[in-house]
Amino acid sequence: SRTLFSLSFLPPSPCRSLSWRFSLSPIEHQNHARDLVRETDLSQWDALVILSGDGLLFEVLNGLLEREDWEEAIQTPLGILPGGSGNALAASLAEYEFKSLVTRLDLVSVHLASSQRIFSFLSLAWGFVADVDIESEKYRLVGPMRFLVGTLMRLASLRVYQGRLAYLPAPPSTPQNSSLFNQKGPPDSLLADLEQPVPEHWTVVNEEDFVLVLAMFQSHLAEDLFAAPGATADDGFIHLLYVRAGISRLALLTLFMTMEKGGHLAIGCPHLVYERVKAFRLEP
């Protein structure tokens, strides 16, 4: 990333006398960025720019939200320069970045069975997609091609995952929440305790056998996967997709091939379900 920064992002010599400065902080290990932004004096900087993939931005955002002054820290402008094998957010925000625009970004609060709470800006995957992501780690050296290799290998041995899924449907016209950060930590008013049943007005999915469950918070799952064509950076929705068991390998491959242009929702796949929701619960 240091070489990529030097070659591509430093201004040309005639412009280096302009009144701007930066500090380059190489990341040395997992959660280094998280620790760094949690302890850094942010008042000396106008923005934080991450040159990496989506994983490093995940660390930065969670580090900001772990600060004592998180309400102020989370307002720090963030930028993302694609430098990883997964650059989904950069793809999702390409129009904003191309026009030098600033936009708000939805964050989703995730409660785990371990009682840990984390914040996600991109997606939550279970089943096929999660397996491809994890199992393709060994191919990281080939860059974005790792996901294609991982997809083909997982298709060759397609699994079915058992779990329970429920969600809170989004009303036809839901006003965006412009005061997300008005409490001590972003509010979780829509979520019931994991030990309690979901509220009666939630929808409980009858099926318990899935090939994948994918919750999208932005439009792209990868640079070349337009998973949620209707999503925008701050629309206030979770775009929930799930594929029921029984889909053939060919049909699933077709689904991902058409996802490159965002056409997967229009091919009439009987195993694919798409819902726009405000909250959901997944119990593997």
Image (cartoon, rainbow, N blue to C red):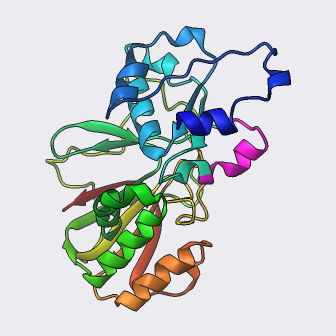
Q: Residue at x 36, y 70 (%)?
A: 150
Q: Residue at x 29, y 88 (%)?
A: 246
**Residue 91 at x, y percent in the picture:** 61, 54
**Residue 136 at x, y percent in the picture:** 33, 62
**Residue 183 at x, y percent in the picture:** 42, 23
Q: How many marks?
A: 0
> In the figure, 102 relative to 55: above or below?
above
Q: Is residue 129 rendered to the left or right of residue 98?
A: left
> In the figure, 76 relative to 105: above or below?
above
Foreground of the two, 7 or 127:
7
Seen from this angle, which residue lies furthest right? 14
Foreground of the two, 185 or 131:
131
Q: Residue at x 61, y 23 (%)?
A: 47
Q: Residue at x 28, y 56 (%)?
A: 281
- Looking at the rendering, which quadrant does residue 108 occupy? top left
Can residue 98 be seen by looking at this rendering? yes
- Looking at the rendering, which quadrant does residue 155 occupy? bottom left
* The C terminus lies in quadrant: bottom left
Q: Is residue 248 rendered to the left or right of residue 171?
A: left
Can residue 201 be seen by looking at this rendering? no
Q: Is 87 in the magenta?
A: no
> In the figure, 176 relative to 167: above or below?
above
Q: Which residues are magenta?
A: 91-102
> In the figure, 227 relative to 143: above or below?
below
- Looking at the rendering, which quadrant does residue 30 occupy? top left
